[in-house]
Image (spheres, grey):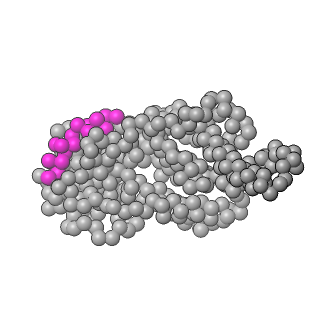
Amino acid sequence: MNSVVVKSKEVTLLEILDRVLDKGVVISGDMVISVADVDLIYLGLKVLLSSVETIEKLRGSPFVGPLQEAR
Amino acid sequence: MKLYLYGIIDSSNQTKESIYGLEEAGVYNIPFCDIGAVVSEINQPIQEVTEGTVLEHEAVVEKLMADFTVLPVKFQTIIDGRDNLLSMMRSYYQDFKDNLERLLNKFEFGIKVIWSADKIKENIIKTLNKEQQKKLELSSSPGKKFMKDKFDKYKIDKEFEAKADKFIKVMDIFFSKFAVEKRIEKLKTKNLLLDAVYLVGKDKESNFREAFEHIKSAWPDFKYLFSGPWPAYNFVVLSKKSGLLREPEQADLFDKVTQSQTLIGAEII
């Protein structure tokens, strides 16, 4: 059960990473010292999918329903 | 003094509660006209992106979201001093203002739908095999068989795409009813059927959640990820070339799928 919770958190974290690192307003110009340039999306997606599949396995039954990630 | 920028808000007032951001520095609003840039002071750009720093950034944006409309700024945007920040605000003001008005009282929700591509393809193959059983018996020479195999693979791939289109079309009809804008991506990977974000008015949130529940129960064999409410990370549209450029309205991915095809698809699948 704990593993399911941990994996659910991983999925939530990946949703956050996806947004914070890849989305959001990009300000450009000389006044900007730095903007993150981290391409984790492909990696993130792979982890996300494997996390979801792991949760299904842990629950012992495929397709048991949604992973409600609302915060 | 370097300023770490978290977001732009629709207020020139300070936050009601104290917020602490990266390096545990106090977060404050630098007003410009009737909007503001929310920042904290930082010594140097973050050397290493960690889970912790990303979560600290997101926590600030989330707290702001409770009281203001927020345009979230990309992680690790650092501006060289207050004067430069005000200069940036001057140059982006109209864009920021337009977005803040458009996104007022709206949230973003993320929906991912995962299907088993292998199972879907297996079903397609079974159906095709049944249909072609008679033809196969009539054309079993090696050359014809080679051509048939090639053609079958093409047909399977086409049918797989068509099924994805039909599913997404139906789902999107439900979600779009309660959303004002959307961004949809189909089959980012073969198993990720739908990766979508919808912009939903606060007053439609419960309807949108109900629509999601409806979809979930309609196709219990799929896996679903529902996230939100988020600030509108995916819906800020800047007109400046140097800024974040997005297409104003995503072209309909499913122009070629008619309403009747959609309904047929829903029944078949």
Report whether B75 appears left or right of B193: left
Residue at x 56%, y 50% (from the top left corner): B187
Q: Which residues are magenta?
A: B84-102
**What kind of secondary structure does the magenta stretch mostly adopt?**
helix
Relative image position of residue B86 (x, y in whole percent): 15, 48
The one of B174 and B262 positioned closer to us in this rendering: B262
Residue A39 in the magenta stretch? The answer is: no
Residue found at the far bottom of this picture: B47
Above-or-below relation of B1 to B212 = below
Residue B93 in the magenta stretch? The answer is: yes
Residue at x 75%, y 56% (from the top left corner): B146
Report whether B100 appears left or right of B257: left
Relative image position of residue B236 (x, y in whole percent): 35, 43
Can I make out residue B217 in this image? no
Which quadrant does the C terminus of chain B fall into? top right
- Image quadrant of residue B163? top right
- Image quadrant of residue B50? bottom left
Above-or-below relation of B255 to B13 = above
Which quadrant does the N terminus of chain B fall into? bottom left
Report whether B205 appears left or right of B221: left
Report whether B185 appears left or right of B143: left
- Image quadrant of residue B19? bottom left
The one of B32 and B45 positioned closer to us in this rendering: B45
Question: What is the number of callouts on the image?
Answer: 0
Residue at x 35%, y 46% (from the top left corner): B65
